[in-house]
Image (spheres, grey):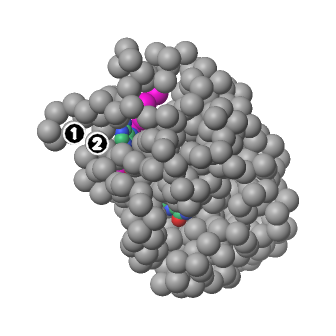
Amino acid sequence: MTDTSALQIAIIGGGPAGLMAAEVLSQAGLSVDLYDAMPSVGRKFLLAGVGGMNITHSEAAEAFLSRYGERRDAIAPLLADFDAGALREWIHGLGIETFVGSSGRVFPRDMKAAPLLRAWLKRLREAGVALHTRHRWLGWNDNGDLRLATPNGERRVRADAVLLALGGGSWARLGSDGAWVPLLEERGVVIAPLQPSNCGFEVAGWSPLFRDKFAGAPLKHVAIRLDDEEPRQGEFVITATGVEGSLIYALSARTRQRIAETGSAILYLDLLPRHSPEKIAAALARPRGSRSMAKHLHSQLGIDGVKAGLLRELTPAETFADNTRLAAAIKALPLRLEHPRPLDEAISSAGGVPFEALDSNLMLRALPGVFCAGEMLDWEAPTGGYLLTACFASGRAAGLGMLDWLRERR
Ligand SMILES: Cc1cc2nc3c(=O)[nH]c(=O)nc-3n(C[C@H](O)[C@H](O)[C@H](O)COP(=O)(O)OP(=O)(O)OC[C@H]3O[C@@H](n4cnc5c(N)ncnc54)[C@H](O)[C@@H]3O)c2cc1C
């Protein structure tokens, strides 16, 4: 094997992708310096642990891969080397147990990210990885050196190979602010615009009454679909401007694309997924005497609170006089979405460095010696652990790709 130990490797970005690349490269005996703009690394990773860190998913490989949609074929080789099972083994190797939740999602035993990150950083430091926080990458100077803004002024760093793992563009206050986009564009890399993924959406405007009463209210045990797709069951939340939550995020890629194509997207909401329209119409047809329609809907079908409010909000008054039409509305309430919420609020970003701009080592064709990994690559996936899994796997693949490239050159 050729000697690569004298080489200087710079990794920029200390999220899961950059840290995984640092692990692979330091294990191979390379001298690794990792730079991050923030005062500490892994801030988004830690945030992901706040509501319960869903690190990967236990479903079968083909179903897992299908979550990457149009980018399935680009992600497949990354996961072939480091899939959900390998990721779990790796976590266990850090002394952190994992478990599979009822939905098939995989979590660390204590649901948290902090113990995992602590153990990992300790191992990386012991392996010789030098972490440089408060080092913001500004691009390259004319000599090809990296420009890094530090509290003590600008530093110039010469590296034999560079790995960028700068994240997407959401939650900028945690470090991934997308400021890298023009830096690569200036060097001839065509970047797909960063867009919100796993995000909330805005409606044309709730009535003030509905908004004031129901903003923040969760709709549970409902189903939604876009067009004639198979409906998905779950829950989401009414916001002051529209909707958000896991069920909405699951459809966010297609919804965002539809809005871009046609100006809006209509999601059809089923308020009673376990009831057929006939059963609903029969229940509505029962005598209601002097009771109001609201009381009738509540007593016959359990529709009340935010579900009743949304039915009123989205259904013309005359529909309430026709049981068949009302039953149809309860099964397919059209919810028109007009805009995604801003990128900064999203769980993740779509867009970024297209796979077409990279070779099989995840090296930029336009910039030999510069590799990319993680959410800054142009792929998206729903929540469910698919985001982190692809970040870890691409960090590993880019690290190994860099090793191959360095060995071939020497
Ligand atoms: C609220 C929330 C919850 C989430 N929950 C989950 C979950 O449960 N499961 C899941 O799979 N995914 C989850 N995610 C997504 C997941 O956290 C991200 O996909 C993942 O962290 C991306 O990893 P990364 O290494 O590519 O980038 P990041 O983690 O974003 O790291 C990028 C790093 O690069 C640094 N950086 C950026 N620009 C520069 C620069 N110019 N110079 C120097 N450093 C720079 C940043 O400071 C940052 O540390 C969640 C995200 C959010 C926002």
- Residue 178 belongs to the span the image colors magenta: yes
9 versus 67 height, above or below: above
Mark 1 lies on residue: 150
- Residue 324 belongs to the span the image colors magenta: no
Residue 236 in picture, x, y percent from top left: 55, 62
Going 62% across and 83% down the picture, which residue do you hit?
99
Residue 105 appears in which quarter of the rendering? Answer: bottom right
- Contact? badges 1 and 2 (CB < 8 Å): yes
| Kind of element beneath mark 2 | loop
230 versus 357 height, above or below: below
Going 43% across and 75% down the picture, which residue do you hit?
119
| Region rendered in magenta | 174-181
Going 46% across and 16% down the picture, which residue do you hit?
186
Query: How far apart are the alpha carbons under marks 1 and 2?
Result: 5 Å
How many numbered marks appear?
Answer: 2
Would residue 391 be seen by someone viewing this image from the given angle?
no
Closer to the camera in the image, 17 or 3: 3
Q: From this viewpoint, which residue is outermost toward the left?
A: 152
Quadrant containing the C terminus is top right
Going 61% across and 20% down the picture, which residue do you hit?
366
**Overall secondary structure of the magenta section:** loop
Mark 2 lies on residue: 135
Residue 249 in picture, x, y percent from top left: 59, 53
Q: Label 2 CB, ligand 1: below 8 Å?
A: yes
- Tag on residue 203? none
* Disc 1 packing (10 Å; few <14; some 14–19; many ≥20): some
| Kind of element beneath mark 1 | strand
